[in-house]
Image (cartoon, rainbow, N blue to C red):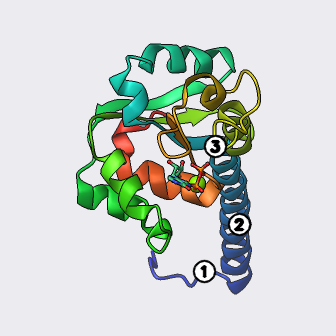
Amino acid sequence: MNDNLPVPINVIVITLKFIMKFTTNDLNVFIRFAKKIMSNITFIMIKPDAVERGLTGNILKDINDAGFNIRALKLTKLSIDEAKMFYSIHSERPFFDELTKFMSRSPIVAAVLEKENAVSEFRKLIGDTDPSNAKEGTIRNKYAISKGENSVHGSDSDENAKIEAEFHFSGREILL
Ligand code: IDP
Ligand code: MG
C-alpha cells in the first residue's frame, strides 16, 4: 500500500476555504463581542475626600441603585508618581500639582463597572466636574467639596476606560 498518495488539489482548496471561512467568522464574532464589552465598561475611583469622610458605602449604593454591576473593586493608594502618571493628560494644566497631591493624599477606591454605555451613563450619574454646576441628585452634587475635591472619577471614553482599568487592575482581578 502506498502511504504517499498525493491529496487532490481541490480537496486542499476546499479544506483551506473552509478553515478560512471558519476563522473569519470566528474573528468577526470575537471583534463584535470585544467591542460590546468595551462599550459596557468604565473605570471609576472614589477619591480621597470621599473615602476620608466615610462616603464609600453611600457612593457604592448609588452606583448599585443606578444599575451598574461591579466587575472589579479595591481599596488602594496612589503614590505621587502614580497620580502624575494616571493624570498625565492634565500635566500642562494649572491644577496638575493640586490634583496629583490630592489624589495621593490618602486611600482611594478603584472599580471597574459594567452597564450598557457605561462611560456616558456613569458621567451622567456623577454630574459636572464642578459640584456647583452638578445636577441635583448626582454624586458630585450630593458629596463633592469643590471642583478639585469632587469625590469621584469616571473615564471619559471607552479607550481610556480600558487603559485606566489596566493601570489599576491585573486581568485576573477584572471579572467580566
Ligand atoms: P472630570 O473628572 O470631570 O473628567 P477633568 O477636566 O478631566 O474633569 O479634570 C480631572 C480632575 O482634575 C477633576 O475631576 C478635578 O478633580 C480636577 N480639576 C479639574 N479642574 C480643576 C480646577 O479648575 N481646579 C482644581 N482641580 C481641578
Ligand atoms: Mg476627565
Q: Amino acid at mark 2?
A: Thr
Q: Spatial distance from mark 1 to mark 3, Cα to Cα?
A: 72 Å
Q: Nearer the viewer, mark 2 or mark 1?
A: 2
Sooner in the amino-acid sequence: mark 1 or mark 3: 1
Q: Position of residue 4 (x, y in %)?
A: 46, 82
Whether residue 170 is visible here, answered yes or no, is no
Residue underneath mark 1: 7
Disc 3 crowd rating (10 Å Cα; few below 14, some 14-19, many 20+) is some
Say whether mark 1 is within 8 Å of ligand 2.
no
Q: Secondary structure at mark 1?
A: loop
* The N terminus, quarter of image: bottom left
Residue of label 3: 130
Q: Earlier in the sequence, mark 2 or mark 3?
A: 2
User: Which type of secondary structure does the marked residue at label 3 adopt?
Assistant: loop
For badge 1, the amino acid type reads Val
Name the residue type under label 3: Asp
Q: Secondary structure at mark 2?
A: helix
Residue 103, x across and y down, in percent: 35, 46
Rendered position, 87 above or below 62: below
